[in-house]
Image (cartoon, rainbow, N blue to C red):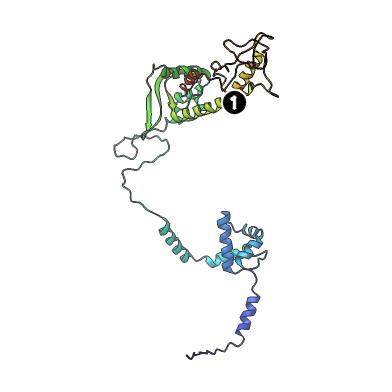
């Protein structure tokens, strides 16, 4: 099958030479490359100022040359060149059209049912007749406010100052001073079943329990006595109690491991504590270090082996002899009773402690 070759002749003269020389003499980036580089600076640095673009571009010469495909001169992103870009882009009609399109594409308007408008204005005074639909009706006063804060705000002088100015406060009471002593009786009221607690629920989830009571307080503000009735809420958070129980369990396990190490099995390199006072002091240090000093241990369980006493007396198990009399009811061969694994923490004391967490 024959192929038809179509030829078209045009007279080019010196046009390729002129354009080629012009391309070779082009210096620096064109307007499009300058714009792309400037946009990269604005978006990456979060800065729209043009005075800092030059320094930024000169700190990344290899990166920008590679991405823009053109050698980067030191003056490329100068104020003069960037100002020229702005002049070419300063077409108000074009920008208004762009803004209009952007607004329509990014703004969402919802039609909501209007039931009323409330303005949170500053406190003001007026002398006028109040009407039901008037411009200045009576409303919630901002002269008397509710202040909420942390335990530092719970200082009695601070609360008295608020009361003296007709304000209210909502703060957690610190467990210091008189509050620390009174707090035990507040918790005991629930633990001893003399106070009924109210369960606090949130969408079917139990958050905790507690109760509320009132007490009379008084203080002096600017030399004047101030008296008021305060509402106190005693609340036991279920989540907080669970975290405290888990923390106590970790402390007990760590203390138990150290207590076991105090009385290792007899053997080479195993140093034994042979004085009861020394052992008790070491036990106290372990309990204090793990913050379980208030938790006593139940009587340890003996190994059930015979304790040869007095020294030189008859016995068995390799003729071991104890340098001190055994504890009451103990028949161990070791210098003292086994601690930790054989012993048990005082469960009654632990239950009493955990039940008072509020």
Q: Which image quarter: residue 300? A: top right
Q: Is 251 on the left-hand or right-hand side of 324?
A: left
Question: Could you tell me if residue 223 is visible in this image?
Answer: no
Say which residue appears at 60% left-offset and 88% top-offset: 13
Q: Position of residue 236 (x, y in %)?
A: 44, 26
Q: Nearer the viewer, residue 204 or 252?
A: 252
Q: Position of residue 67 (x, y in %)?
A: 60, 64
Q: Is 95 on the left-hand or right-hand side of 54?
A: left
As drawn, which residue projects farthest toward the right? 269
Q: What is the crowding at mark 1: few (fewer than 14 residues within 10 Å), some, or many (at least 20)?
A: some
Question: Could you tell me if residue 106 is visible in this image?
Answer: yes
Q: Nearer the viewer, residue 192 or 228?
A: 192
Q: Position of residue 44 (x, y in %)?
A: 57, 56
Q: Is residue 202 above or below residue 307?
A: below
The number of callouts visible is 1
Say which residue appears at 58% left-offset and 61% top-offset: 38
What residue is shown with label 1? 257
Q: Position of residue 327 (x, y in %)?
A: 60, 11
Q: Is 176 on the left-hand or right-hand side of 335?
A: left
Q: Is residue 264 above or below residue 127?
A: above
Q: Callout 1: helix, strand or loop?
A: helix
Q: Which image quarter: residue 303? A: top right
């Amino acid at each position: 099958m024959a192929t038809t070759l179509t030829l078209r002749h045009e007279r080019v003269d010196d046009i390729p030479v002129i354009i080629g020389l012009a391309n070779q003499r082009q210096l620096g980036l064109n307007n499009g490359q300058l714009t792309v580089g400037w946009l990269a600076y604005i978006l990456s640095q979060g800065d729209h100022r043009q005075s800092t673009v030059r320094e930024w571009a000169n700190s990344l010469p290899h990166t920008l040359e590679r991405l823009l495909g053109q050698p980067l001169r030191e003056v490329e992103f100068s104020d003069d060149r960037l100002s020229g870009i702005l002049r070419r882009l300063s077409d108000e009609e074009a920008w208004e059209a762009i803004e209009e399109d952007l607004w329509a594409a990014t703004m969402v308007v919802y039609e909501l049912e209007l039931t009323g408008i409330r303005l949170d204005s500053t406190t003001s005074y007026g002398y006028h007749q109040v009407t039901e639909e008037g411009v200045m009706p009576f409303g919630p006063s901002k002269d008397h406010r509710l202040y909420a804060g942390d335990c530092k705000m719970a200082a009695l002088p601070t609360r008295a100052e608020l009361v003296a100015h007709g304000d209210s406060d909502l703060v957690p009471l610190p467990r210091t001073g008189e509050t620390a002593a009174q707090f035990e009786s507040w918790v005991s009221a629930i633990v001893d079943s003399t106070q009924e607690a109210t369960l606090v629920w949130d969408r079917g989830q139990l958050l905790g329990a507690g109760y509320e009571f009132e007490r009379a307080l008084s203080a002096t503000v600017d030399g004047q006595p101030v008296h008021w009735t305060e509402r106190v809420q005693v609340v036991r958070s279920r989540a907080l109690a669970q975290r405290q129980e888990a923390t106590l369990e970790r402390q007990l396990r760590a203390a138990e491991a150290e207590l076991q190490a105090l009385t290792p099995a007899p053997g080479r390199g195993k140093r034994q504590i042979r004085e009861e006072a020394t052992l008790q002091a070491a036990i106290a240090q372990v309990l204090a270090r793990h913050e379980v000093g208030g938790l006593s241990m139940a009587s340890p369980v003996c190994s059930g082996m015979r304790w040869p006493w007095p020294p030189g007396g008859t016995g068995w198990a390799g003729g071991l002899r104890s340098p001190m009399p055994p504890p009451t009811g103990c028949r161990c061969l070791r210098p003292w009773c086994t601690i930790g694994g054989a012993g048990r923490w005082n469960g009654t004391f632990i239950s009493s402690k955990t039940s008072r967490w509020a």
